[in-house]
Image (spheres, rainbow, N blue to C red):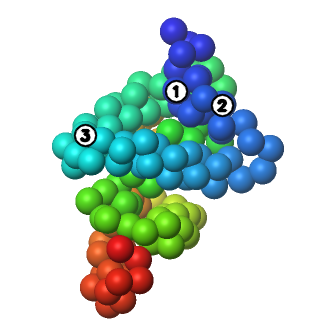
Amino acid sequence: MRRLALLVSTCGYVGYAPIAPGTFGSAAGLAALYLVRLSGSWPVELAAIVALFAAGVWSGSEAERHYGREDPGYVVMDEVVGMLITLFLIPVTPLGALVGFLIFRALDIVKPFPARRLEDLHGGLGIMADDAMVGVYGNAIMWGLIWLLPGWLA
């Protein structure tokens, strides 16, 4: 089970990228978004977010035990879920997806309140919750940009 947890938490070992694993994990989130959007169904998109969040909590906790430290950098499932939340229900163009990606990465680095405090939650929940909160902020910013710049991003 631990191998499966590491496979899930690192998104098929994307988290082992030699530089910027979080950025590679966020890019994997864009790939996941593309696949989920093929269904054309927002309930499928929501179900994917919930399922991947739950899988991230479980696998993140296992990864912490395996690596012997909190929030190991190899774990990137949180970035995947954060990207999915950032673009949830937003009909983005490729440019819009890129802007969402950049917004999410910036917010993930800054971690505005209360995202940074959510990292203090125990185990995989702490790994996942801060990026989910950042994704909520990213989603709100994206909707604001779409309202301000109609036709540019969506």
Q: What residue type is labelled 1?
A: Val
Q: Which image quarter is the C terminus in? A: bottom left
Three-letter amino acid code of the residue under disc 2: Tyr
Residue 79 at x, y percent in the picture: 51, 49
Q: Which mark is residue 37?
A: none
The residue pinned by badge 2 equals: 13
Q: Name the residue under label 3.
A: 44
- The residue that label 1 is drawn on is 8
Q: Which residue of the protein is positioned furthest toward the right in this rendering?
A: 18
The image quadrant that residue 87 belongs to is: bottom left
Residue at x 66% of width, y 26% of height: 67
Q: In this view, does 42 lie to the left or right of 5?
A: left
> Looking at the picture, how far across and down is residue 4, in whole percent?
54, 16
Question: Is 105 above or below relative to 128?
Answer: below
Badge 1: residue crowd in 10 Å (few <14, some 14–19, many ≥20): many
Image location of residue 56, percent across then percent down: 43, 33
Secondary structure beneath label 2? loop
Of mark 3 and mark 1, the one earlier in the sequence is: 1
Query: Looking at the image, is mark 2 or mark 3 nearer the viewer?
Result: 3
Q: Position of residue 101 (x, y in %)?
A: 52, 64
